[in-house]
Image (cartoon, coloured by chain):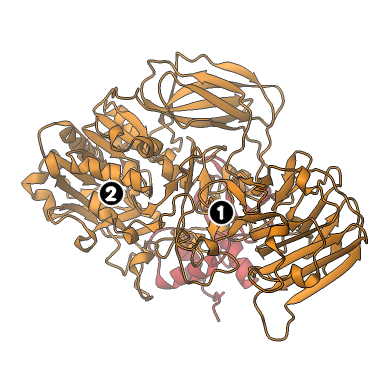
Chain colours: A red, B orange
Amino acid sequence: MLSIDPSRTDLCEEFKVKPFGRHSADLHRLLDLMRWGFARGRTVILCTVPHKEWRLAKFGPRRGTPMQIDDGRAFTSYHDAVWACFRARWKEMTGGECPVE
Amino acid sequence: MPERLLAYTDKLSAEPGDLIEVKVSAPRPGTYRASLVRMICGDDSPDGPGFKIERVAGVPGNEYRARRQPIPCGSYIEIDDRQSFALSSFSVRTFIWPTWLDNGSEQCILGNWDAATKSGYALYLDASGRLALRIGDQAPLVLPHDLMSRHWYLVAAAFDAASGRAILAVRRLMAYGHSGQRHFAEGQLTPSAVPNRFLIAAWNEGKRATAHFNGKIDSPTIFAEALKPEALLACPGTRDEPPPERAVADWDFSQDIGGTWIIDSSRYRRNGHTVNLPTRAMTGWNWDGSEMNWKRKPEHYGAIHFHDDDLYDCAWQTDFSIRLPKDLKSGIYCVRLVQDELEEFTPLFVRPPKGKPTSPIAFLVPTASYLAYANHQMDTSWHFDELSSAKFTSVNRTDQFLEETYSLGLSTYDLHGDGSGVCHSSRLRPILNMRPKSDLWQFNADTHITDWLAAKGLDCDIITDEDLEHDGLDCLKPYRCVLTGTHPEYYSLKMLDAVQDYTDRGGRLVYLGANGFYWRIAWHPSLDGVIEHRRSEAGMRAWMTESGESYMAFTGEYSGLWRRNGRPPNLLVGTGFSGQGFDVASYYDRMPGSRDPRAAFIFDGVTDERIGDFGSIGGGAAGWELDRADAALGTPPHALILASAGDFPASYHWVSEELNHTHSAVNGDTCPMIKADMVFFETPHGGGVFSVSSISWAGSLAHNSYDNNVSRITENVVRRFLDPKPL
């Protein structure tokens, strides 16, 4: 079965430091699993102020419905938003909190 | 939903002196301010060259009263005659291939029912996807039987006014095991014979069309009598088929497939027309795979696919007009609208007066490719978007607006709501990603080129793909040097012939992008500003054309890759699409070809071995999409490979059309086919082609105040190409 090994904190650390570009084979596999399928229903990133502010969000059930925007947290860098999205996806897939803050 | 000013113009390409009609929908009451600006650079990101516009002095800014205008999406057919369908007794029958049974809305198949007055009749799918008949304001007769998506059915209804007997009937053409193929329901209703508009694939709601059908409809027929049940469900050509000569109308969608007419093949000729361009040349109920080209067997292509999100023309009223000054310099302009803190730009490409070029350089703006991507919603259309981009879905307020609006019309990269691929894209609607201050893709990325030209003092004329389609080679002939955009991906036959003829006759082409000249499209022969595309057979496809539907309705041409049409891009520009990735960009290393004396002018003053290891797009000049030289695909034998980029991570992926068999070595870190090759070659009569073969190249031009090896190489090439001395 294709699943994420929740004990691999090393992969979280690797992604947090370098979210783009070359990754280890194990992190590449983990990201492929996280990214399979439609984004609808899963945590995504919404830029709310161009070049300045990002929030986590989810698409509605279909086109023509409102997005759900996490108003509780705003990120001032895209990389921080990407890391928060990684942690949210980790929880969506494993059911547990991402072990790396 | 974020508030947006929305606007479009009647023209995208214009000449000085032209009158431009601007159509606006403003979200707030009051007024908005409009002006005309020249667009130098639309990139407002902190890493870019800076946002640069200039006010056009000859066009005064003005205040205009704000109003909202509707977005009338959804395709359907309107029949011109009304009186003949004000029937007391009737039968209707048609084939359908429903595609979105669970969308939760009523979907009209055909009829003249008006939801505003609750009069007339309609055969339709109810909100649960079941076949239903509605007459007047009475409760509908519903067939208590579920239909299946993407299956052909013959559906019918008969109503006898004298007895009040109504019959609903359905027959599934595909037989499965023990499930019955035919179902009937019977009820009592009273007539509503009124001369409402007769529509197919929608019903009336006053003057509007609503309850749009999603799916195919084929061969609808209507009779002024209640047919017997066995006749209702008899296929054409069988013993019980109702006599066509008794039909009130018998529409044949296989006629005028390329146009908008709907032909009634009965003796009455009760014709109609399509609205919002439903997809035609679709395989019909009787298609059996014996022919793939609809022109050779149109009788198998009698289906039209309707979608509730089709949109050809918003048909908005004009809010104001702008007369372009007669001495306006050719360039990219935008109508700028401001209401409070809201700001919108709608572009306008001003070419020089016909036959009067104002510069030896032309920038060929790839407006066909802008249309192909217009208002794209790949983030939700694609199940593979994150895997392709190697990023978590990252959207902006424009994407949010498009997601929450149903619908501003889609791009050829999207799926309709019913999951079918989008074949058409038009400019007669607001296009929110063809504007400055948007993602650095297509239009906005191309302003890196206009910015660089301005910085270098290189004047240029503007020509668009629409001009190329209209005038062919004539619009390129006056120029010594033609520059492409960063991603001129979509080409019609006439456009491709014009550029090929230009280089064959001594023209000089600077290809400043990648994945160009890739897909074959058609412009509609008579409708303004709309392209068609089918994602046939192979290529990096957003969706896959259904079997038998690879030939375009507009022209009958086989669509898909130019490579599969015998015209690989390598023949024109020396390189062709090899791979893509969207997280980081890379650099080029100089190759032996750069030492060839023929290339000396290109590297004049360039001492670096590594080219473009900097830039505002991914951090390098070789990135996003890449092209490779390949003699087997037509790269000329004398082409010099000047530099090559091949250092890409696993997030870069090899193009699927070259992967004839699956395996795992298809990524940047394992596949040697993923490369960007910078090439130069001479063409007949002293012409030449220089290709950078990377989309991110233009994002490096402004680095270090335009003083860098990418800028130097580009300038060396352009200045030499301007020299009439043969290459």
Is B345 rendered above or below residue A86?
Answer: above
Q: Is residue A97 visible?
A: no
Q: Residue at x 86, y 52 (%)?
A: B88
Judging by the rendered image, the residue that carries numbered circle 2 is B613
In the picture, residue B62 is in which quadrant?
Answer: top right
Judging by the rendered image, the residue that carries numbered circle 1 is B279
Same chain for mark 1 and mark 2? The answer is yes
Front-lying residue, B246 or A17: B246
Graded by Cα atoms within 10 Å as few (under 14), some (14 to 19) or many (20 or more), the crowding at tag 2 reads: some
Give coordinates of residue B27: x percent, y percent. Answer: 68, 32
Q: Calculate the distance from the C-alpha at mark 1 to the C-alpha at mark 2.
A: 45 Å
Q: For the residue marked with disc 1, what is the amino acid?
A: Thr
Tell me how many marks there are: 2
**Chain ID of residue with mark 2:** B
Front-lying residue, B633 or A54: B633
Q: Nearer the viewer, mark 1 or mark 2?
A: 1
Give coordinates of residue B333: x percent, y percent. Answer: 44, 27
